[in-house]
Image (cartoon, rainbow, N blue to C red):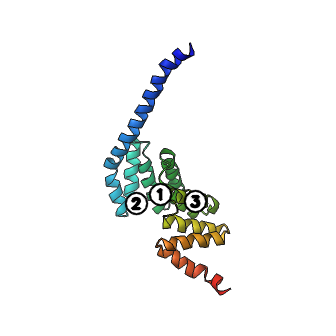
């Protein structure tokens, strides 16, 4: 009797899974098409207009990780940090495989002086980037410095310098010069 129930239930579950997969693939294609105008506004640093644009798009596409991410960047630049944090969390909840979302969420937490939480977000970003993103390494180093992990911070800054990050080189020269004098 159980196998008969399974026989009818299994195609139903597979059909739902297929349509969810199809919606995600089709939706990401529509994302690229529909959000281009907003991306141009972000590039032109018209953050208020871009934030309004993405807010409008999210009314029609409420599961768009990219729209939440881009609106979060606008909120960050407009110094609406709690709104930015919400948007980055929404973006991550819909697509947790974008390392850049973790970097921006970490930057937001850093601005809110929540260094422990910021460190965790930068650490996630570093994991996604496989220690090959100098920006994630620099920010993780800054968060580590703020929570007292100085040696690990220096390691992060040094790795970022190896990857060509001039900002990390400047930080190493200015903040950690005293270590060389010892």
| Image quadrant assignment for residue 47 | bottom left
Q: Is mark 1 on a helix, strand or loop?
A: helix
Mark 3 / mark 2, whichever is N-terminal: 2
Q: Left or right? Give the position of 133 relative to 120.
A: left
Q: Position of residue 107 (x, y in %)?
A: 53, 62
Tell me the residue at 51%/56% (across/down). Answer: 128
Q: From the image, state whether disc 3 or disc 2 is nearer to you.
A: 3
Which percent across, then down, holds residue 31?
36, 47
Q: Can residue 51 be seen in this view?
A: yes
> Quarter of the image containing the C terminus?
bottom right
Give the Cα separation between the discs numbered 1 and 2: 18 Å
Determine the residue positioned at 47% across, 53% down.
Answer: 98
SS label for mark 3? helix
Q: Nearer the viewer, mark 1 or mark 2?
A: 1
Residue at mark 3? 123
* Residue 47: mark in rendering: 2
Check the image and name the residue furthest to the top. 1
**Viewer-nearest residue: 93 or 81:** 93
Image location of residue 23, percent across then percent down: 39, 37
Q: Nearer the viewer, residue 4 or 122?
A: 4
User: Which residue is labeled 1 in the image?
Assistant: 100
């Amino acid at each position: 009797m159980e196998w008969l129930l399974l026989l009818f239930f299994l195609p139903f579950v597979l059909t739902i899974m297929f349509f969810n997969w199809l919606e995600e693939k089709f939706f990401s294609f529509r994302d690229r098409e529909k959000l281009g105008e907003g991306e141009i506004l972000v590039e032109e640093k018209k953050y208020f207009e871009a934030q309004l644009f993405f807010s409008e798009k999210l009314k029609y596409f409420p599961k768009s990780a990219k729209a939440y991410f881009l609106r979060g960047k606008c909120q960050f630049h407009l110094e609406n940090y709690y709104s930015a944090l919400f948007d980055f969390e929404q973006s991550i909840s819909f697509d947790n495989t974008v390392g850049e979302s973790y970097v921006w969420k970490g930057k937001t937490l850093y601005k809110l002086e929540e260094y422990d939480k910021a460190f965790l977000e930068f650490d996630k970003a570093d994991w996604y980037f496989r220690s090959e993103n100098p920006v994630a390494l620099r920010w993780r180093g800054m968060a580590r410095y703020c929570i007292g992990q100085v040696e690990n911070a220096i390691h992060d800054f040094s790795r970022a310098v190896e990857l060509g990050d001039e900002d990390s080189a400047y930080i190493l020269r200015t903040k950690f010069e005293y270590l060389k004098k010892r």
